[in-house]
Amino acid sequence: MTTAAIRWGIIGCGNVTEVKSGPGFSKTPNSALVAVMRRDGDKARDYAERHGVPRWYDDAAKLIADPDVNAVYVATPPSTHKQYALMAIAAGKPVYVEKPMAMDHDECEAIIHAGRQANVPVFVAYYRRALPRFQKVRELIFGQRAIGTPRIVNTVLHEPHHPRYHDPKNLPWHVQPGISGGGVFMDIGCHTLDILDWLFGPIVSASGHASNQLGAYPPEDTVAMSFAFGNGMLGTGLWNFDSYKHHDQIEVVGDEGRIAFATFGNGPITVENARGTHEHHVENPLHIQQPLIETIVAELTGHKGACPSTDETGARTSWVMDQVLHDYRRETGQLIGA
């Protein structure tokens, strides 16, 4: 597809679209947000009025059929990503799907197959690939070779049990496996795994353990994994969502130094080598998805460049999470499609 301007329709105009993504569609050159959909029509209308969007719907099929919409952003929970992506593809409209790409790798493959058959591009909202912060990390590792040759990577994220998960009768969808595919690891751990894929290439082998230590919700609250990249690098990952304080770090150790940075937030990028310790500070933009949206629009309008987060890269991260969560899902009866 090559067109002069991209006119977006959003399916699922919830919280993530308020600041992180929604405004970016209108602020990107050659791009506009022309329609939104939510099953609750009053909420869809309210969103449209507040954000100056011309039309709203309470039916996804009607938004997709809107002749003025020529690209679709699926911002619903993962349980409907496949359904809406396939509908948009069938209509010949490029799709931008929220992360994780789908409930599991099999669903990702179905989306990929449909997109290839129809020659319709599919993108995934792993927007960190386009953020200046992670571009700086990549430049330090591979451009400046600040740590020499990368050898190993360790990633850790732990944080206290969030109050929104305290009421077992009113759990957010993020921890309802029939809607989300898993727990908080599935929701945010995927960002870390994807950025590692972008930095070092596909993870070709992964295994691990998951457990539910707190018992506050059905899916996992703790994950430990090990993994290997195709280039021979090895790594470990550890996530826990019931610890005493927040800690978020990716550490890459090379033969001449180390670099440490967080997946989330604006903390410093720290480099240690023979020249000492140096911190680099790169702020995230207000509309954090906008840099990636700009790459999608540039690709679809035939301008220079291509989006770095595709259906194939998004599916790889889902495959890794499937490997790690398979035994836990089987033991707890939470296998997708079971």
Image (cartoon, rainbow, N blue to C red):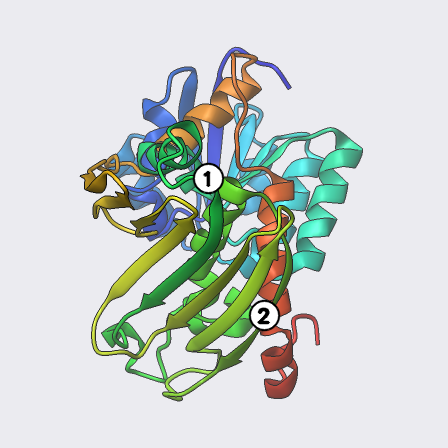
Q: Residues within 10 Å of mark 1 (few under 14, many from 20)?
A: many
Residue at image position (40%, 70%) is 239
Residue appearing at x 36%, y 84% in the figure: 169
Q: Position of residue 87 (x, y in %)?
A: 66, 43
Left or right: residue 86 versus residue 324 is: right
Residue 167 screen position, x and y as percent: 30, 83
- Give the total number of marks visible in the rendering: 2
**Mark carried by residue 127:** none
Image quarter in which the N terminus is found? top right
Residue corresponding to mark 2: 324
Q: Assign a secondary structure to mark 1.
A: strand
Q: Amino acid at mark 1?
A: Ile
Res. 84 in view: no
Residue 71, horizontal then vertical, whole percent = 55, 30
What's the amino acid at mark 2?
Val
Please tell me whether mark 1 or mark 2 is closer to you in this view.
2
Check disc 1 and report the residue beneath it: 10
Tell me the quarter of the picture where residue 286 sits: top left
Residue 337 can be seen, yes or no: yes
Callout 2: few (<14), some (14-19), or many (20+) C-alpha neighbours within 10 Å? many
**Relative side of 107 to 100, left or right:** right
* For the residues bearing labels 1 and 2, Cβ distance under 8 angstroms: no
